[in-house]
Image (cartoon, grey):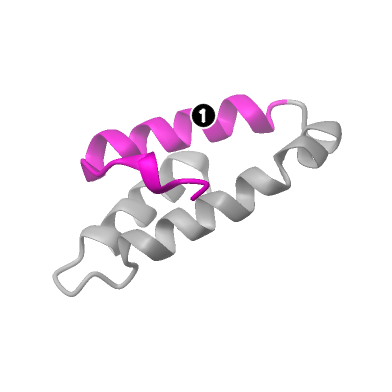
Amino acid sequence: MSKRSLDKVTINLTKARHGLISEDQLIKGFESVLAVLEDAVNDAPRAQSSLAVFFAKVVMEMSFHFLKLGD
């Protein structure tokens, strides 16, 4: 799956009529990705910048606050 497709799928699953992925589930998923990001950068040097772009697109589309992230 391309990076562009991933952000669209994530947004659509979260915005779906019945919200197949809740905001809390999305945040927990982001937290788990962030927890291993440092190790991932060793294997994939562009992981950090790719993840930043992905997060930015999702945050802009979803209009919810990431203040919960890391609570």
Q: Amino acid at mark 1?
A: Ala
The magenta segment is 46-71
Is 40 left, or right, of 7 in this rendering? right
Q: Residue at x 55, y 35 (%)?
A: 51
Q: Residue furthest left?
A: 17
> Is 10 a magenta residue?
no
Q: Is residue 62 above or below residue 48?
A: below
Residue 40: x and y in percent read: 77, 40
Tell me residue 22's x, y (percent): 32, 66
Q: Secondary structure at mark 1?
A: helix
Q: Quadrant of residue 26?
A: bottom left
**Location of residue 2 in the rendering, given as x and y in whole percent from the top left corner:** 52, 45
Check disc 1 and report the residue beneath it. Answer: 52
Identify which residue, 3 or 56, lies in the foreground: 56
Side of 71 relative to 45 (left or right): left
Quarter-wise, where is residue 64 in the image? top left
Residue 36, placed above or below residue 51: below
